[in-house]
């Protein structure tokens, strides 16, 4: 799978470089540089064809829209993955706490003293269960 991405990345880097060079040629265009301009345009067309061929190999890849929002905001898309993992970890800890509470509700009542006015009989009932 990584080979597919590496191949696409290589083609994209070449394409970006050709676009950069095209910008240089166009910004300082001289009639004598027409042949170089035509050649660079042909390289760009070939580069787009190569990128399109890579697209066919990566048709099953889905990217969350939030990643594109990160990119549009000028943020690193890898931060999206990091923040998703942090949210998942926080939610996991929250759910684990709920599960632990459901397994032994008496420990929560006694350990955190949530019900200071609870009858002694109730506290003793939970204490014997623990």
Image (cartoon, rainbow, N blue to C red):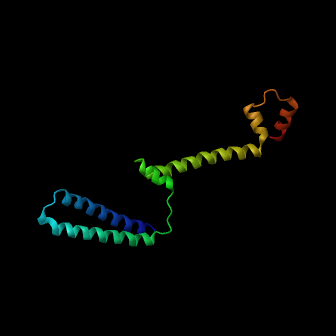
Q: Determine the image quadrant of residue 104.
A: top right
At x 45%, y 50%, the residue is 70
Q: Nearer the viewer, residue 19 or 121?
A: 19
Q: Nearer the viewer, residue 62 or 103?
A: 62
Q: Position of residue 45 (x, y in %)?
A: 30, 70
> For the view shown, which residue lies furthest in the top direction?
117
Q: Is residue 60 visible?
A: yes
Q: Position of residue 87 (x, y in %)?
A: 57, 47
Please indicate whether residue 46 sits to the left or right of residue 88 in the image.
Answer: left
Q: Quadrant of the C terminus?
A: top right
Number of numbered markers: 0
At x 27%, y 61%, the residue is 19
Above-or-below relation of 106 to 25: above
Q: Position of residue 110 (x, y in %)?
A: 77, 34
Q: Nearer the viewer, residue 71 or 107?
A: 71
Q: Position of residue 39 (x, y in %)?
A: 21, 70
Q: Determine the image quadrant of residue 112.
A: top right
Q: Is residue 76 visible?
A: no
Above-or-below relation of 106 to 71: above
> For the view shown, which residue lies furthest in the front direction?
31
Please indicate whether residue 43 sits to the left or right of residue 7 in the image.
Answer: left
At x 67%, y 47%, the residue is 95
Above-or-below relation of 26 to 57: above
> For the view shown, which residue lies furthest in the right direction?
121
At x 86%, y 37%, the residue is 125
> For the view shown, which residue lies furthest in the left direction?
32
């Amino acid at each position: 799978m990584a080979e597919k991405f590496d191949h696409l990345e290589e083609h994209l880097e070449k394409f970006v470089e050709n676009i950069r060079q095209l910008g240089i040629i166009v910004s300082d265009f001289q009639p004598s540089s027409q042949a170089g301009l035509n050649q660079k345009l042909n390289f760009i067309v070939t580069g787009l064809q190569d990128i399109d061929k890579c697209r066919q190999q990566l048709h099953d890849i889905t990217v969350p829209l939030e990643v594109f929002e990160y990119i549009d905001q000028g943020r690193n898309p890898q931060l999206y993955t990091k923040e998703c993992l942090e949210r998942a970890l926080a939610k996991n800890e929250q759910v684990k706490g709920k599960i632990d509470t459901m397994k032994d509700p008496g420990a929560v009542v006694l350990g955190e003293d949530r019900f200071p006015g609870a009858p002694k009989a109730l506290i003793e009932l939970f204490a014997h269960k623990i």
